[in-house]
Image (cartoon, rainbow, N blue to C red):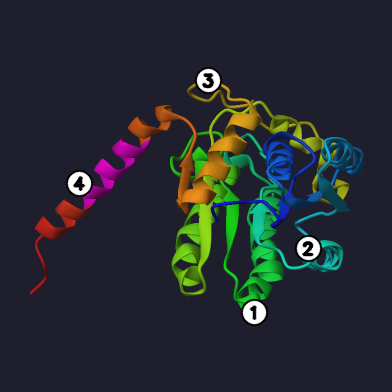
Amino acid sequence: MESFAGRVAVVTGGGSGIGRALAVALAREGARVVVADVEEPALRAVVAEIEAEGGRALGVPTDVSDRRQVHALAARAADGFGGVDLLCNNAGVVLHGGIEAATHEDWQWVLGVNLWGVIHGIEAFVPAMIRRGEGGHVVNTASAAGLVATRGLGVYNTSKYAVVGLSETLAKDLRPWNIGVTVLCPMGVATRIRQAGRNRPAALGGGRPAAGEPVELMGGTLPPEQVADMTLAAVRANELYVITHAEVLEPVRRRFERLERAIHRTRGAPTRP
């Protein structure tokens, strides 16, 4: 997708942070943008910002953990702007604390948004992309925590590792239809994700004090606009990965060195007669 002009893009979690930056950047490049978010005031503000700059945007309140709401989002996008060319499954939440202390509601909340939100987006939008036969692109926001495990982020790590694996497989599955896939793996970005609990449903433990202390990340904190620019550049080039911080290189290298050593140990292990 070399140009976004005239394209239709959907961005979940578009009311703030990376999602807002993606929506604004896409609109400035001529895309018609459907912005989805669970926070309606933030959603309206982003739509107003895009329209004030002469862009076209549609805001749709959406909880991505709810499959019906994501399918309703797809219907609103089609009714408002037509076929979707670019899907950004960006909505996400974070939970700090060890797996040993995680409640079932913790798992439901984080996986509901971070993993099922991506799955719901794929279910709702990708079949229509295939039927149109005009190609397209899917961006899934994961994290560097989907590449390297971090103590105190176990539930979040689990969700993001799943998104990375899903994206790698999806890229192979969608290649015959000229639909590209990019998985975004940022580290520190100046967003409000650490305050994600503000939108946690009461039925899943909302309003309860945080169980763990925030984990301090390596590397600097990037502005969301810079991450959005990196992501759109990757979409243009049909690149699978966006890894925003060079600091993750050494932990990733150590992980794969451990995997390599394990493979060599297995190959050298005696076999049973």
Compared to residue 223, the image places residue 71 above or below, namely below
In the rendered structure, which disc, 4 or 1, sits on the residue that comes first in sequence? Answer: 1
Check disc 2 and give the amino acid type: Val
Percent across and percent down for residue 167 are 51, 58
What secondary structure is marked by label 3? loop
Asked whether the beta carbons under mark 2 and mark 3 sit within 8 Å of each other, the answer is no
What separation in Å lies between label 4 and label 3 (alpha carbons)? 31 Å
Secondary structure at badge 4 equals helix
Q: CA distance from mark 1 to mark 2?
A: 19 Å
Q: Quadrant of residue 163?
A: bottom right
Q: Sequence-wise, which precedes: disc 1 or disc 3?
A: 1
Q: Give the labeled residue for mark 3.
A: 220
Residues rendered magenta in the picture: 252-262
Sequence-wise, the earlier of marks 2 and 4 is: 2
- Nearest the eye: 188 or 48: 48
- The amino acid type of the residue labelled 3 equals Gly
**Residue at left offset 44%, top offset 43%:** 147
Q: Which residue is mark 2?
A: 70
Above or below residue 83? Residue 133 is: below
Disc 1 marks a residue whose amino acid type is Arg
The quarter of the image holding the C terminus is: bottom left
Name the quadrant containing residue 54: top right
**Label placed on residue 261:** 4
Classify residue 163 as left or right of residue 260. Answer: right
Examine the rendering and report whether any part of residue 157 can be seen: no
Q: Is residue 107 left or right of residue 159?
A: right
